[in-house]
């Protein structure tokens, strides 16, 4: 695996997600966002995962980052209360 391969990390995140390995899934999405901080899909995925895990403060941080950087936010996330 390439150290900064977004495709590899995305595939690993999907596998971990479907295996209900939440902490591992979070780690992979965090790595994806670190590699490409302005990636719309990965930021939305990370915020959504934080909401699902009830990490509301972390979800809010991702949403605030997205707003600050004018990254499109999934409308479903906008309606969530945090």
Image: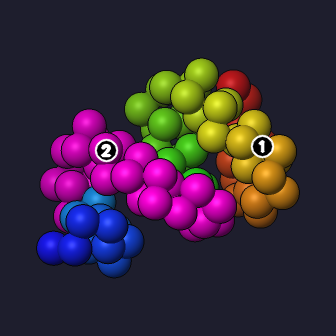
Q: Which residue is mark 2?
A: 27
Q: Is residue 40 magenta?
A: yes
Q: Between residue 35 and residue 28, name the one nearer to us.
A: 35
15 lies above or below 66? below
Name the element at disc 2: helix
Q: Which mark, residue 79?
A: 1
Rendering coords of residue 33 (x, y %): 50, 54
Rendering coords of residue 8 (x, y %): 26, 73
Rendering coords of residue 62 (x, y %): 63, 40
Whether residue 80 is visible here, answered yes or no, is: yes
81 lies above or below 67? above
Alpha carbon of mark 2 to alpha carbon of mark 1: how far? 25 Å
Tell which circle, 2 or 1, labels the residue nearer the N-terminal end.
Answer: 2
The residue drawn where x is 58% and y is 56% is 37
Residue bounds of the magenta highlight: 15-42
In this picture, residue 67 sits left or right of residue 77: right
Q: Residues within 10 Å of mark 2 (few under 14, many from 20)?
A: some
Q: Between residue 43 and residue 35, name the one nearer to us.
A: 35
Q: Which mark, residue 67?
A: none
* Secondary structure mainly formed by the magenta segment: helix
For the C terminus, the quadrant is top right
Q: Between residue 39 and residue 17, name the one nearer to us.
A: 39
């Amino acid at each position: 695996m390439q150290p900064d391969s977004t495709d590899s990390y995305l595939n690993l995140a999907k596998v971990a997600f479907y295996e209900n390995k939440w902490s591992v899934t979070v780690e992979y999405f965090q790595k994806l966002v670190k590699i490409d901080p302005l990636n719309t899909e990965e930021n939305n995925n990370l915020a959504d995962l934080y909401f699902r895990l009830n990490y509301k403060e972390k979800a809010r941080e991702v949403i605030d980052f997205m707003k600050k950087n004018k990254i499109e936010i999934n409308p479903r996330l906008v309606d969530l209360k945090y």
